[in-house]
Amino acid sequence: MSMSSPRFVLSTLAPLAIAALLAGCGADTDELQRWMEQQRREAKPNVTPLQPPKKFDPHPYTANAGVEPFSTQKLTVALKQEARQPNSLLSAQLTRRKEPLEAFPLDSMSMVGSVAKQGQPSALLKVDNLLYQVKVGDYLGQNYGRILRIGETDIALREIVQDAAGEWIERPATLQLVERGR
């Protein structure tokens, strides 16, 4: 390897350049150290002292004699009270005789037509490939649905269902006419 080769020049000059750079940085460190010491002396921390913890006073549990809130005994008592006070909406439905269309859910029924006999509207419902004729006042569906109105294209009815709180409420529902393509 000759002294003029680029490899030789780089291998000898690189360490010399690094040493020169490091030597230049060493002189300023004394001044930096003095400045850091001065800043430490002048800094005054502002920390609020911690409050001592409050004393914990345990209290005895006095509800052991009562009914456990998640027990089956409490649920049984609540259900018995509900049975003794039936809702007026539901009590009338429990005493009457069920009609044949109350055995089917409302979504399994489809309105396929409507007719008027002697001025009274009636509708044709298809359930399990059988046709049923219904009129205003008839019951259908599994939620105590009663027909309120029959139009040319729909049947309006009222159902009795339980809400989220367990109360029995009335809910409107409709059956739309299903048109078949020709």
Image (cartoon, grey):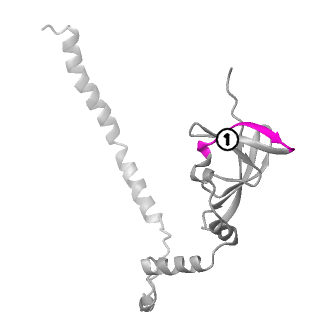
Secondary structure, mark 1, is strand
Q: Is residue 48 left or right of residue 182?
A: left
- Say which residue label 1 marks: 125
Q: Main secondary structure of the magenta part?
A: strand
Q: Residue at x 45, y 59 (%)?
A: 39
Residue with the most extreme left position: 1
Q: Is residue 161 left or right of residue 47?
A: right
In magenta, the rendered stretch is 107-119
Residue 145 lies in what quarter of the image? bottom right
Q: Residue at x 62, y 47 (%)?
A: 106
Give whichever of 55, 84 is nearer the camera: 84
Give whichever of 72, 14 is nearer the camera: 72
Where is residue 31? Give x, y as percent: 39, 49
* Three-letter residue code for mark 1: Leu
Where is residue 67? Give x, y as percent: 45, 85
Where is residue 86? Give x, y as percent: 63, 75
Residue 139 lies in what quarter of the image? bottom right
Give whichever of 122, 52 is nearer the camera: 122
